[in-house]
Image: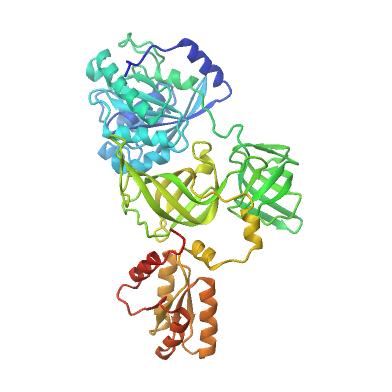
Amino acid sequence: MAAPNFEFSARSFAASSLAAANQNLLRFTTAGSVDDGKSTLIGRLLYDSQAVYEDQLAAVKKSRINRSTGAIDFSLLTDGLRAEREQGITIDVAYRYFSTPRRKFIIADTPGHEQYTRNMATGASTADAAIVLIDASKGVLAQSRRHAYIASLLGIRHIIGAVNKMDLVGYSEEVFRRIAQDFEALSEKLGVEDPYIVPISALEGDNVVRPSSHMHWFQGPALLEYLEELPAGSDRAGSHARFPVQYVIRPDANFRGFAGTLASGSLRTRDEVLALPSGIKSSIKSISTYDGEIEEAHAGDAVTLTLHDEVDISRGDMLVSEGRGPHVARRFQAKLVWMHPDELDPRKLYLLKHTTRLVRAHVRQVRYRVDVNSFDHQSARTLAMNDIAQVEIETTLPLFFDPYSALRATGSFILIDPISNATVAAGMIEGPIDRLDDSWALNCRSAPVTAHERQEKFGHASAAIVVYEGKETAQQLERTLFDQGWNALFVDANDATDAELRAVAVTLRAAGVIGVFRIAQAQRRLLAEVFGADLFDNTNADLIAQLVQWRDDNPGELQ
């Protein structure tokens, strides 16, 4: 590999300055390994840009927890939790706001510990730029590589390699160039274009806000100077309109509006729009905001739309502009960052939150797991905390999405455990596996619902569970199954006639439901006639495991 060129181009710097003229707010995050100095760097930025209140500065100076050899421990300006101060680490994401005469900034200070990688991904999810700190005395470490990889996955276009603690290596140009070459090689593997690499000392202030007098050999701008001129490109500008519906507003019979935030593009009154999933076309009658009606809404605007036609639209549906629409699919390929101590269970139904839509989903296959040190692809059946992988996901209802690389808002999602309600993973959609054609919704509305469609939606076929004990036992079983994602219904048929029980059983069988029947023992024969091999006794010691095995052995066409 050719040695990287560290001479900064005044022409390219001026060009980026012009591009940034109308983009006054920059969101950036810090990333890297533990103890690389992320909190200290942000504290130095706040202090040198005079964005620290006097009482806050006085409290930091008086703090008995001072890990710095100087008068001020800059990390205490951001590490606000008691556990963070005591342990000298960052645990939660800390957001800080400051401005210079040239720009406004929002900083996300994220943890470096591998244990808190999920917090780093959260902080970086909305960033325009990422500063990956590297300890000059240690070089590029595994966690630095992990964070740089996650930053690239999240579509952060501007990645800055800040080689910190240059004071500990005597401000050595040789050390900086060696680390910079390693970071250049890492960036090339990740597909990061034009990373900016700068030598700094956050503790001493070298090359943070102003150029360093100790490193005359470096000709580029200081870190803050570079951030002030960096273009904060938005992936929403110029895109086709995407409007996920968050609420349906119906204060009276004369008004029916659809509230939400425009994720991309723009919409004007009288524009033609397409409602998904119904596929019905209409046009915009009005666009309302808190301050009144407007003629045009742009990406990021929170608005309420009304249409000229009565269209059946609910929360989770989407209005899009005519032309190039989003993908409509239930199966898609995605990159997944696993964030929870409990491993991924491929047999489990998770909740998937995508824009304003909440559906159930299976991780059908882990195609490969990424080794963050070599970026090699490894075979895997499950994922542990902080693992990054490419997966195939199938949802019970179709999603309307764009690839994450094209639009973050409609290309990202999270997975939620339905029992604990914990967020277990964050995902970036790469593309559909089976795209539905444009007439999907209309065909689906006009055709009868099939047993296969019900099985696809619920994730399982119909079955019966017989309970001979009391009513509370059956209701508790219904609750357990429901909380785990099964479409279960309790039926108290203990006093029902055979004819009544048969009628209910046939109905639930056709509806694809797991029926929890409280019956007399003599009635088991009748249910067996309806459900056959799909009949289970609650006396089984591990009924749930038996049901899971049954579901996996009878996937229909779901696999």
User: Residue, x 42% and y 86% (percent of image)?
Assistant: 524
Q: Is residue 517 above or below residue 169?
A: below
Q: Which picture quadrant has residue 2? A: top left
Q: Residue furthest front?
A: 557
Q: Could you tell whether 174 is left or right of 506 in the image?
A: left
Q: Quadrant of residue 194?
A: top left
Which residue of the protein is positioned furthest toward the top in this rendering?
Answer: 216
Question: Which scheme is used to colour this image of the protein?
Answer: rainbow
Which quarter of the figure is the C terminus placed in? bottom left
- Examine the rendered structure and indicate whether residue 284 appears above or below residue 127: below
- Foreground residue among 341 and 485: 485
Residue shown at the point (71%, 49%) measured from the top left: 281
Residue 277 or residue 106, whichever sits in front: 277
Measured from the top left, where is residue 375 in percent x and y? 32, 35
Q: Is residue 312 left or right of residue 132?
A: right
Above or below: residue 160 compared with residue 390? above
Where in the figure is residue 298, as x and y percent of width and height? 64, 36
Q: Position of residue 22 (x, y in %)?
A: 58, 23
- Asked if 117 appears above or below 527 in the picture, the reply is above
Q: Where is residue 426? Give x, y as percent.
A: 42, 46
- Judging depth in this view, the residue of 238 and 128 nearest the camera is 238
The quarter in which the N terminus is drawn is top left
How many numbered tags mark residues here?
A: 0
Q: Is residue 380 left or right of residue 265?
A: left
User: Does residue 34 show up?
Assistant: no
Q: Residue at coordinates 26% horizontally, 27% vertically from top-left?
A: 68
Residue 490 visible here: yes
